[in-house]
Amino acid sequence: MFAPSQPCRDSRVTFQFTDLLNACTDTCKFYARAYPTPSPTPYPTTKNPTATPTATPTATPTKSTDASLSSITSSSGSLTPTFSGSSTTYTITVANSIGAVTLTPTIGESHQTIQYDKDLTGVYTSQSSAAATGTIFLIEGCKTSVRFMVTAWDTTVTKVQLFTIRSFNSTHFLCSRNFLTLNFTF
């Protein structure tokens, strides 16, 4: 039961109307006072009103399917045809006196990966972009082949480019690399 310390008309306390009726006698007067009605809380737009809001998802970049080198340089010799990235076969011609070369491939997209295979053995070695390969030894008068395999960012596209390094003298190619000479004496 409510028991005000002062008469009801002087009270500045907010309380339930039923408490007022019970506490006051015939001497109490009630005055109506209008208060603005609070706006109703809008209904949640999600099916689960207790779910916490999530961050707005950002767009996922499209992974590139480009698997081409943007350039390649040789420590010695000249490249034919001029490098374009779209061609898959090139020749590097070096003087016969050159015993070894390195090749420096550069990728065009930062997420691509490069590997190379010396002498077409099928064994690929990881290669950093814009860094020289390991030493590629040449045999005088012969040709040596190197394959570069570039994998695109999406990892489903690969491109292999073949570089044939030809070591020559001024008159003709001399290659004894794959031949065995046997001398028999009877």
Image: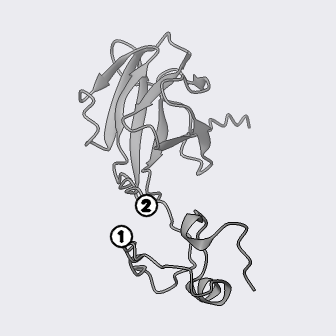
Q: Quadrant of residue 180?
A: top right
Report the residue at 44% width, 37% height from top: 110
Q: Residues within 10 Å of mark 2 (few under 14, many from 20)?
A: few
Find numbered disc 2 in the image and state the secondary structure of the residue it sits on. Answer: loop
Q: Which colour scheme is used?
A: one colour
Type of residue at label 1? Pro
Residue 35 in picture, x, y percent from top left: 39, 70
> Quick one: 112 or 85, which is closer to the camera?
112
Determine whether 123 is above or below 25 in the image. above
Which badge, 1 or 2, comes first in the chain's sequence? 1
Determine whether 11 is above or below 98 in the image. below
Residue 149 in picture, x, y percent from top left: 47, 46
Report the residue at 73% width, 34% height from top: 185
* Rendered image: mark on residue 57: 2
Find numbered disc 1 in the image and state the secondary structure of the residue it sits on. Answer: loop
Q: Which residue lies furthest to the front in this view?
A: 27
Image quadrant containing the N terminus = bottom right
Q: In which quarter of the image is residue 6?
A: bottom right
Q: Quadrant of residue 5?
A: bottom right
Report the residue at 59% width, 72% height from top: 8
- Residue at mark 1 to residue at mark 2: CA–CA distance: 40 Å
> Quick one: 135 or 112, which is closer to the camera?
112
Determine whether 139 is above or below 65 in the image. above
Type of residue at label 2? Pro
Q: How crowded is mark 1: few (under 14 residues within 10 Å), some or many (20 or more)?
A: few
* Rendered image: mark on residue 182: none
Residue 14 in picture, x, y percent from top left: 58, 70
**Mark 1 — residue?**
36
Residue 9 in picture, x, y percent from top left: 54, 69
